[in-house]
Amino acid sequence: MVTTFMDQEQKKLKKKFHTLLGKCGIGQDGKEAILESYGVQSSRELSAKELLDICDKLTLQAYPELARQDKLRKRVIAVIFKYYDALGRAVDMDYVKGTACRAAGHERFNDIPGERLNNLYYAFRDKIKDIRAVGRITVEDLPEYIGLN
């Protein structure tokens, strides 16, 4: 019997699913509850997408530090998007991640350590406050300059 790439991936995901169940300390009852929430009785009945979704959730549960890092990364991405929005520039995800990498001095976004992500978040947040404050001051002083012309 010939197995396709997707069959091989699904087999790996099933193995990962069962490994993560053990890592999380989830017994048979917990496993059955997870499967029931997807409307199946066996992990063999789950699609690759469903298995991937379950494995992602179990990974975050098994490794809480990964969940913390993930949350920090999302905060940094959001604040950099807001920073560029305050500047009036439309940017995409790659540009935002590139900005974070340059600011942190790292080649890859996922290599930026948690403490540095926190520093970046507060630095960009402060920059946004500065941009908004300067904008308010400029608008308040504008009538005075119009009268000088």
Image: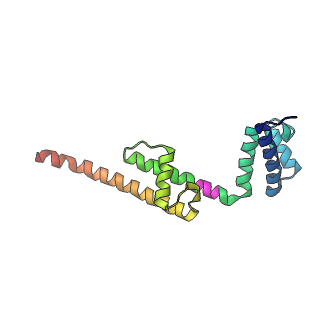
**Picture quarter with the C terminus:** top left
Q: Position of residue 60 (x, y in %)?
A: 70, 53
Helix, strand or loop: magenta stretch: helix
Q: Which residues are magenta?
A: 67-71
Q: Residue at point 76% right, 37% down?
A: 6
Side (left or right) of 27 relative to 102: right
Q: Residue at point 83% right, 39% down?
A: 36
Q: Residue at point 83% right, 50% down?
A: 18
Rendered position, 65 above or below 2: below
Q: Residue at point 37% right, 44% down?
A: 88
Q: Is residue 25 magenta?
A: no
Side (left or right) of 107 relative to 16: left
Please identify the residue farthest to the left as the structure is shown: 149
Looking at the picture, the colour scheme in use is: rainbow
Q: Position of residue 68 (x, y in %)?
A: 63, 58
Rendered position, 47 above or below 144: above
**Picture quarter with the N terminus:** top right
**Which quadrant would residue 63 be assigned to in this image?**
bottom right
Q: How many marks?
A: 0
Please identify the residue farthest to the bottom as the structure is shown: 115
Q: Nearer the viewer, residue 8 or 34?
A: 8
Q: Position of residue 10 (x, y in %)?
A: 79, 41
